[in-house]
Amino acid sequence: MTAALVVLGLFVVILALLLVFFARTRATGHAHLKSAPGLTEDMLADLSVSTAVKGDESPDAKQVAFLCAGETAPAQTYISHVFLKDPRITELEPHGFIRVDWQMEHAKPDRYHVLESAWGQLGFQYHEWVTIGPAHYESTNLWAPSSPDKRAAWNQALRADKFLAILSSQEPRSADLYRYRGVPYYLLTYELSSLDGFGPLAESLPAPYEIRAWVHRGTGLLARGDVIAAADGNSPARPELTQVFTHYNEAVQIAVPQTETSPEEPPV
């Protein structure tokens, strides 16, 4: 009898803990949802309609779009790699026509760590910066405080928000299910005449645009966004922007860089 009461008591305690857990999860949304194995940069770098296998399923486009926006927006951290390709620049052919690439770590609400590699007359130029709230730091060889306005537009443009705004407000042209390396992804396509929210990224991408949003089916998280710009009158080549998203809600360390005037602050 005593043993039965003990077992019953343990069951009640476990049930209560489960109820608290689910209540907290419901209250905080999906803030603790982490990336899936199919959301790695190696997986996503070559994801395309030509490398993936199209399935027979025809998903509800708006439902997938709202699901993705709803699952991705609460993410507190993520890492993103952005490529701006321009096949019109023949010198870039050995580099895959990549004109600029950015590697960004982001922790909400206002922490950014960005590495930029940009093609210019002297070859590739490299820049690195960290923004933490109103504080901003630039590195050439040494870190130094800088104006917070210098990179503010770039920080905003590199976030996932611009794609989430499209998913939330625009009508998809199509929705399909693809399987790539055994992982299923939804592909949503859009046709737009402007790139609201893309900030300085839009300056190198002539209108109109084809937008492709790849959504990881298992989590609903945005896996990759592509912007394919219009070809100009002199060349059929079309510049394009590719951005992949990984490490959702995983540990992203963005701390004050080591400078002579840096305050001590623990990373988050």
Image (cartoon, rainbow, N blue to C red):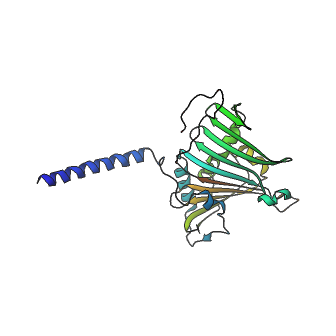
Q: Residue at x 63, y 50 (%)?
A: 80
Is residue 125 at all visible to an observer of this figure? Answer: yes
**Residue closest to the eye, 54 or 174:** 54
Task: Determine whether, in the image, residue 126 is placed left or right of residue 155.
Answer: right
Residue 12 higher or lower than 238, as above or below:
above
Q: Is residue 161 left or right of residue 250?
A: right
Residue 98: quadrant of the picture: bottom right
x, y percent for residue 58: 56, 68
For the N terminus, give its image quadrant.
bottom left
Q: Which residue: 68% across, 51% down?
A: 82
Question: Between 266 and 53, which is closer to the camera in this rendering?
Answer: 266
Residue reaching furthest right? 234
Residue 69's x, y, as percent?
A: 56, 51
Which residue appears farthest toward the left when viewing the image?
A: 1
Please name whichever residue, 106 or 187, is drawn nearer the observer in this view of the structure. Answer: 106
Q: Going by the image, does 6 lie left or right of 70?
A: left
Q: Nearer the viewer, residue 74 or 34?
A: 34
The location of residue 252, given as percent across then percent down, is 56, 44
Please name the residue shown 58% across and 63% down the image.
Answer: 186
Residue 238 is at least partly visible in this image? no
Number of numbered callouts drawn: 0
Instruction: Name the residue furthest top.
Output: 261
Res 224 → quadrant: bottom right
Q: From the top left corner, tell me how far across and down residue 16 is, in percent.
A: 29, 47
Residue 259, placed above or below residue 250: above
Splitting the image into 4 quarters, where does residue 225 fall?
Answer: bottom right
